[in-house]
Amino acid sequence: MDKHILKELRRILGPDSLLTSWEDRACYSYDATGQSFLPDAAAMPETAEQVAAILRLANEHRFPVIPRGAGSGVTGGALPVARGLVITFSRMNRILEIDAANMIAVVEPGLITGELQAALKKRGLMYPPDPASLKFCSIGGNAAECAGGPSAVKYGVTRDYIIGLEAVLPSGEIIKTGVRTEKGVVGYDLTRLLIGSEGTLAVFTKLILRLLPLTESKATFLLTFPDLAEATKLVAEILSAGLLPCTLEYMDRTAIAAVRDRLKQPLPDGTAALLLVEFDGSKEEVHQQAARFAKFVAEKGNCVLRQAADEQKTAELWLARRSISPAVLSLRPHKIAEDVVVPRSKIPDLVAFTERLAVELKLLILTFGHAGDGNIHVNIMLDKSDPDEHRNGLEAKERLFRFVLSLGGTLSGEHGIGITKSAFLPLEIDPASLQLMRRLKQLFDPNGILNPGKVFPKFSASSC
């Protein structure tokens, strides 16, 4: 990016909205992977028209453009691996509309997910997707990765609540997709195509969200188990029994140890695993589900059941759960964080495999996550400065992926592919489907300027 390009960007954005100092650029060089790539500059647009002008300039001069949410991704999806210009949406962070009568909201991509949920709660409404990083992740980033969260077992994931988009194509054209209504089948479903495309096909500038009425009541339970297999086996049995929790979370012994100081309540000696189970709905529905659940657990025997007494105790439990990912770095300096998904009935097989893998490769491997929908987070802890440990960690990752696919699972439930999983895409996607995806990328972005190097290694710095 030469002086002419930077001058044009300042003209488009204004002098205070283009960051070129080393210190400023360093702030947009990394994400939660721990990897870092310094961009040439960072832009802070305020309108869709500015985004469009940036992309037209990028197409003309063939420099990479990398859309970035809050930088909380763990697969490198927002890393500027080919340098270029990072677009940050910190100034496009408004709630533009809350239409309570039709239960929709229109928001900008830089809006923090937790801030949206807090604003809707005051109106008696809810936006169900709730990634663990909701206090700092953005709606645009959630949409790019199709984020999930603990509530996905009952309510679904981000793509289930985005019904329309305003987006800018790599050519600089502004398009509007989807509807503001409950139904709409006119033309191809471009909204669903763009959600989860990891910033490789278009840049989001507005999102139309489907909302739900805020639930009246909740009941939260903590189950502790002396046996890991018993905990994982119970997951499928809970749902097969006709119980419908809004969250069903799982933590193994090592994950528990990492956040024990945040639990603020003693656990039974010898606790090997726990389940965090929550029901929501009307007071009557929650009372009935809670009573049925307590009876169901009592008949199982080999666990201890506690119900959170009040909102404070519930908040303490969720603080512990949402703190796992950063807390585990107290165990080892680095981690390989994977978010594989298997059929719920196969969770015991997956967890048993990770235990065997840890012993065989002399690694610390922990498991936790959204057991209700089979989305288990597997963290392979290691010290990258130890060559043997680093090599064993990478071997564990590949063997994990192959085992997950053998169970009928998938390599990612919510983190996406980015750069950390792209080499493994052919393990899951057949050649014809991969070729179709590449053709779609070529159709949307013939010059390869938009988020190059992600998902498909073909679209790397050398192609820009």
Image: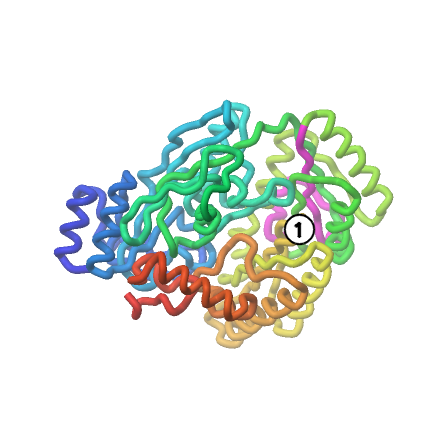
Residue name at image x 65 percent, y 58 percent: 342
The residue lying at 45 percent from left, 37 percent from top is 179
Residue 84 appears in the figure: yes
Tag 1 residue: 371
Q: Does the magenta stretch include residue 23?
A: no
Q: Which is nearer the eye, 298 or 227?
A: 298
Q: In this view, does 418 lie above or below 222?
A: below
* Quarter assignment of residue 445: bottom left
State yes or no: residue 259 in magenta. yes
Most distant residue in the front direction: 186
- Residue 268 lies left or right of residue 380; in this view the side is right
* Residue 365 or residue 425, whichever sits in front: 425
The residue positioned 68% from the left and 55% from the top of the image is 253
Estimate the x, y position of residue 351 in percent, counting from the top left. 68, 61
Question: Which image quarter holds the N terminus?
Answer: bottom left
Quadrant placement of the C terminus: bottom left
Q: What stretch is highlighted in magenta?
A: 255-281
Residue 320 visible here? no
- Given the image, on which type of amino acid does mark 1 rest? Ala
Q: Residue 94, how many percent across, how many down? A: 37, 33
**Residue 409 placement: quadrant:** bottom right
